[in-house]
Amino acid sequence: MKKILLLTLMFTGMAFSNVYAQSPQSVVLTFYENLQREQAVDFKGFSSERGQNLFVSAFSDGKPDIPSCTTCHTPSPTGTGKTRAGKIIEPMALSINNARYTDTVKTEKWFRRNCKSVMGRECTPREKGDFLTFMMGQ
Ligand code: HEC
């Protein structure tokens, strides 16, 4: 009996350490993947290309002075951006800024705020996943 308990604990521990072995970014991405799967049964994965399109596109339904993500984040994912108040925004590309996309609450907060300002609406889970997939490959 004791042995079984010990084994169970061991396997549970292994399962947990597996969760922690995942990169924090893949935890954030999985969050959006699960949301998207709930909405669309035919989910076929995120697309870096769609993510790039979202990043560089100009929209007309948001605030007129910030038509695009690139207005603040610069057209290059590796560029250092600026808020309208002149505050520095560290680059979005994961390859040179691995502090990015490590916290679902933070990422979600900024998606909500920025998508509303630029597009006049919230981004869908698919758009968020596409955007992250693009930036994580940069
Ligand atoms: C008005 C300026 C501005 C615009 C336009 C803007 N952003 Fe941002 N964004 C910021 C600021 C400021 C932060 C937070 C500071 C930071 O994380 O460096 C941020 C952070 C983020 C984050 C959080 C990243 C992380 O580390 O988790 C995401 C995601 C993001 N922006 C996506 C977008 C998308 C998508 C668009 C276009 C739809 C966009 N942003 C447009 C200013 C902007």
Image (cartoon, rainbow, N blue to C red):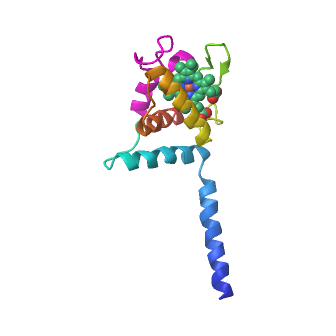
Query: Residue 104: which quarter of the image?
Result: top right
Percent position of residue 66, x then y:
50, 14
Q: Is residue 105 above or below residue 7?
A: above
Q: Is residue 70 above or below residue 133?
A: above
As for residue 46 lying within the magenta part, the answer is: no
In the current view of this chain or complex, which residue is farthest to the bottom?
Answer: 1
Count the labels in the image: 0
Q: Is residue 99 above or below residue 121?
A: below
Q: What's the magenta region?
A: 48-77
Question: Which corner quadrant holds the N terminus?
Answer: bottom right
Q: Residue at point 68% right, 86% down?
A: 2
Query: Residue 92: which quarter of the image?
Result: top right
Q: Residue at point 65% right, 74% down?
A: 9
Q: Residue at point 61% right, 46% down?
A: 24
As for residue 57 lying within the magenta part, the answer is: yes
Q: Is residue 75 visible?
A: no
**In front of the other: 127 or 61:** 61
Q: Is residue 71 visible?
A: yes
- Answer with left or right where residue 39 lies relative to residue 62: left
Percent position of residue 76, x then y:
53, 20
- Answer with left or right where residue 106 lies relative to residue 71: right
